[in-house]
Image: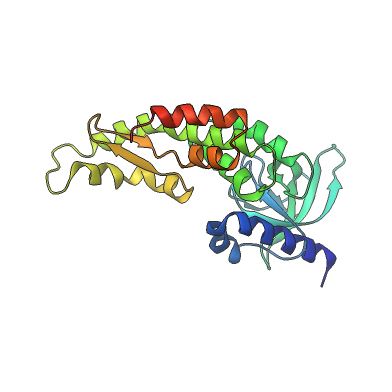
Amino acid sequence: MNPHRITCLALILTVLAFSPELAAKTKTKLPPGGKLAIVVDERLSALRSKPDLKAMLIRRLARGRLLAVKSVKTSPDGIVFFSVNASRRTQGWIQREAVVLPSRKGDDARLLLLIKASTDFDRIVRARILLDYFPRSSLRPEVLLILGDSAEQQSSKLSLDAERRTRNSFSAPESSFFLNYVGLDRYNRQGVGFVFDEQARRLHYDGSAWRELVRRYPRSSAAMEAEKRLAESPR
């Protein structure tokens, strides 16, 4: 077996051991032929026919897309490109800054900078990528706290949007209209859940990331902050 493929497979098995939910997602999406990379910045994620920003666009790759990096090349204008397999039939060149490689030292820190520069749902998605694909990163406690805090911040807007769509609804319990609100679907796909506070008639983050933080990294400073969040959250 190709040494690159062995390395990639070993890394995936490690990741899946930490995230069973990820197994189903990656089973059909992981392309063969190189080191694992994940698209994190869709603003730069143009897959091109050559390592050149002016080369023909093959397709735009979505955030979270898994790639196999085969080689690297620097264009005459100094832009670094990766030659990648996007699938068994689709290959091309993508700018280095569009992706992170779990096998490359420092890419978790680079992703954290992007997470902090992001807002709203984008911040949650990028935080989820780091948690899913960097199982041994020392930055995980900080990212778990960011994920939980971002979800709770989003809960206010989600509550308002859900409330507008539940007016004059008498056919089912009010909580079911809030918790079935279509705006929660994309959060659910990121493993982010919400609970309904009947007294306040609003949604709150369910606290899963904070609880994981306290359970797995109890001695971290982030865990102390997470305990405060949990103490203040509705039961």
- Total marks shown come to 0
Asked whether residue 17 is in view, the answer is yes
Estimate the x, y position of residue 80 in percent, counting from the top left.
Answer: 81, 42
Relative to the observer, which residue lies in front, 28 or 218?
Answer: 218
* Residue 19: percent from left, percent from top: 58, 55
Residue at image position (70%, 40%) is 108
Please give left or right for residue 155 compared with residue 215 in the image.
left
Q: Give left or right: position of 206 versus 79.
A: left
Q: Quadrant of residue 130?
A: top right
Which of 164/8 is in front?
Answer: 8
Task: Give how far across and how far down residue 72 sits, in percent.
Answer: 84, 50
Q: Residue at x 59, y 66 (%)?
A: 27
Which residue reaches farthest bottom? 1
Please, which colouring scheme is shown? rainbow
Quadrant (top left, top right, bottom left, bottom right) of the C terminus? top left
Q: Quadrant of the N terminus?
A: bottom right
Give residue 159's quadrant in the image. Answer: top left
At 50% from the left and 37% from the top, the residue drawn is 210
What is the x, y in percent for residue 121?
49, 37
The correct choice, above or below, for 229 with respect to 38 in the image is above
Is 188 positioned to the left or the right of 4 in the image?
left
Residue 28 in sight in this render? no
